[in-house]
Image (cartoon, helix red, strand yellow):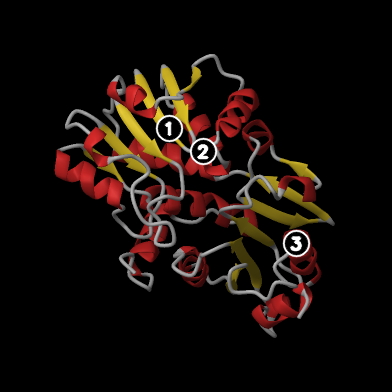
Amino acid sequence: MNALDALSRLAPQQAHTAMLVGLIGRGIQASRTPYMHEAEGSRLGLPYIYRLIDLDRLPPAAAHLPTLLDAAEWLGFSGLNITHPYKQQVLPHLHRLAPEAAAIGAVNTVVFRHGERIGYNTDCWGFAESFRHGLPQARKRQVLLLGAGGAGLAVARALLDLGVEHLLVHDTDATRVAQLLAQLGDPRLVAAGDAQAALAAADGLVNATPVGMASYPGSPIPTQWLRPDLWVADIIYFPAETALLQAARACGCITLPGAGMAIFQAVKAFELFSGIAPDPAAMARHFLAARPPLSD
């Protein structure tokens, strides 16, 4: 089976009358994004179909990112969301980037328009909005960010825009940290080789690694490093409360789960795909109503 055949099975027969979008990633069966988009489309009277394109579920011959992009475009998709691990890998296969995506160096939303593939980043705005709503009084003198991949780039930009004075970045791959610092080029960014020492002097901690997802269980740091005066944020939303957030809450930390970022990034992506601004409160209700439950 080639990529076109694989995507044809996902595309509805009535695709020409509907908004057809999808999500490319690995291990994404628990994603609530399809339900959020489809439910908001229904509320607005917009025929809207959202398909998961999980490369872990496709035959090896079909699980090829550039071919999947070609096939989606051929089949009339309006666009695609892109998630782990493809937010940077997708860049060479796009015609141009929106300014925020170019500045961040990672894309989570691709719009097919007038023969072009345009890359956007709605993760940055999504995390910033979630932070403003969930941690409005958080201290931001020094923050430790775990993860320097595509999501880490977006979150780092958001934290700097939120006013973090010193952002320490740690990743198990030091090369990725160096690339993040070079990409964003902000003097407030510092590579943190020793995560424990960095956390000891920090006001807050953000996990932008996949560790904590259902497919990557566990905590990205030893939980004994936590202390009650920290705030702790995680961008993962399945499960709803990761091992890190559970330990942080038990320790007395103020916590910010990943649901808010998931909702707000979807709000912006919906508008990019459809040209219609959705209602964030309605999207939040759709998120909570989606199945399977977040604990799955």
- Res 61 quadrant in image: bottom right
* Residue at 25 percent of width and 41 percent of height: 223
Looking at the rendered structure, the kind of residue marked 1 is: Leu
In the rendered structure, which disc, 1 or 2, sits on the residue that comes first in sequence?
Answer: 1
What is the x, y in percent for residue 240? 31, 57
Where disc 2 sits, the SS reads: helix
Q: Quadrant of the C terminus?
A: bottom left
Report if the CB atoms under discs 1 and 2 are less than 8 Å apart. yes
Looking at the rendered structure, the kind of residue marked 3 is: Leu
What is the x, y in percent for residue 233? 34, 40
Q: Residues within 10 Å of mark 2 (few under 14, many from 20)?
A: many
Please state which of residues 127 and 133 is positioned toward the viewer in this rendering. 127
Looking at the rendered structure, the kind of residue marked 2 is: Gly
In the rendered structure, which disc, 3 or 2, sits on the residue that comes first in sequence?
Answer: 3
Q: Residues within 10 Å of mark 3 (few under 14, many from 20)?
A: many
Give the residue number, with chain letter if any, for mark 2: 152
Q: Quadrant of the N terminus?
A: bottom right
* Residue at 39 percent of width and 62 percent of height: 214
Where disc 3 sits, the SS reads: helix
Query: Which of the labelled discs sits on residue 69, or is there none?
Result: 3
Q: CA distance from mark 1 to mark 2?
A: 8 Å
In the rendered structure, which disc, 1 or 3, sits on the residue that comes first in sequence?
Answer: 3
* Residue at 56 percent of width and 62 percent of height: 26
Give the residue number, with chain letter if any, for mark 1: 145
